[in-house]
Image: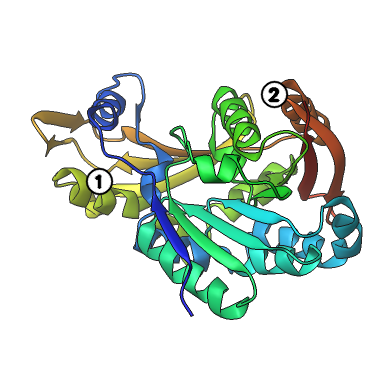
Amino acid sequence: MEYVNYIECFSEDHDEIDDLIFGLSDEIQKRLNSKYFYDENGSLLFDQITKLDEYYPTKKELEILDVQKREIGKLLPSNSAILEFGSGSNLKIKKLLKIIDSPEEIISIDISKEFLLKNANELANTFPEIRVTAICADLNQKIDIEDIVGMKIPKVGFFPGSTIGNFLPKDAKKLLKRFKDILGNNNFLVIGVDLKKDIKILEKAYNDSEGITAEFNKNILDRINIKFGSKFKKKNFEHRAFYNSKENRIEMHLVSKKAHCVDILDNKVCLKNGESIHTENSYKYTISSFKEMCENVGFEFQKVFTDKKSFFGVFILKTRD
């Protein structure tokens, strides 16, 4: 069996190109949008990262979904549609589908088309009694899907993996508001959040001994080369990740090993020796700070579940009128 429906809401536009050049031309700090990590290879690499000993978030989130499944199930409506924002692998959505009583539809949303379709087909085969819809979309852009907004059955949004931490706080608020608009009033959002903890644990999670995170970080250059015709060479960069205590976030950078220039479209990007391109943030929250953020954009806090060490939190939120 294959997924029932496929919708594509991802569009190329000049604003995307302008943003790319603007970020790479910044003399204070060059940067790339972390959304470019997730082509098929990037998604596969991240899937490998989640299995590493050093990388705790996935393990802790799965632990919470296992240990607290009964309590989580009591808070969520039966016969609902599950909207997974940034579908990734199917490991967590499968657990949620077993937690919720008689789910009627799975709506998987992801920017990586190949990875999305592969996972949507797997879900359709695993849960033949549930309708599966795959939506290729960029969560950084407005998603206006009338057939989702107009659905009459209860809706449960699912945003696992602490992906919310990749967004600047102001952008995280915008994204949460976008989720609220898509879900409509009196529906639910289940969201994974990485909590503040010892800096050594945080930095170790993003600097694994096998170098897979470094490979994942450098893969963004391959994606830019393919998408925009540039000629970045991965061998000219090294991976660096560290915790910024002032901003409460892990930062990932690609540091230039030498002074060099790269042509991209009609522009030339030049880097000094030791200059970095900032590729990703991963903000860490306290329970109270994330709860406050959600309430400020129109969610009612229901409950938070944590693992035994309080490394990670799964928040249950409800949209209000």
Q: Residue 117 is drawn in which quadrant? A: bottom left
Q: Residues within 10 Å of mark 2 (few under 14, many from 20)?
A: some
Is there any visible trace of residue 248 in the rendered image? Answer: yes
Up-down: is 257 above or below 103? above
Mark before the other along the chain sequence, 1 or 2: 1
Asked if one can make out residue 209 in the rendered structure from this viewpoint, the answer is no
Of the pair 153 and 252, the residue shown nearer to us: 153
**Residue at the extreme left:** 266
Q: Amino acid at mark 2?
A: Val
Residue displayed at 80% across by 60% down: 64
Q: Nearer the viewer, residue 149 or 177?
A: 149
Tell me if 275 is positioned left or right of 300 in this view. Answer: left
Residue with the mark numbered 2: 297
Q: Is residue 236 above or below residue 299?
A: below
Q: Which image quarter holds the C terminus?
A: top right
Residue 216 in the image, given as x and y percentages of width and height: 41, 57
Left of 61 or right of it: where is 210?
Answer: left
Q: Is residue 38 left or right of residue 282?
A: left
Residue 105 sits in quarter: bottom right
Amino acid type of the residue tagged 1 in the rendering: Ile
Q: Position of residue 121 (x, y in %)?
A: 48, 73
Which mark is nearer the camera, 1 or 2? 2
Query: Residue at image x 73%, y 56%?
Result: 80
The residue labelled by disc 1 is 224
Q: Is residue 281 above or below residue 313?
A: above
The residue lying toward the viewer, choosing from 260 and 264, is 264
Which x, y percent locates residue 243?
59, 37
- Tell me: residue 14, above or below residue 105: above
Q: Secondary structure at mark 2?
A: loop
Which residue occupies 45% across, 53% down? 135
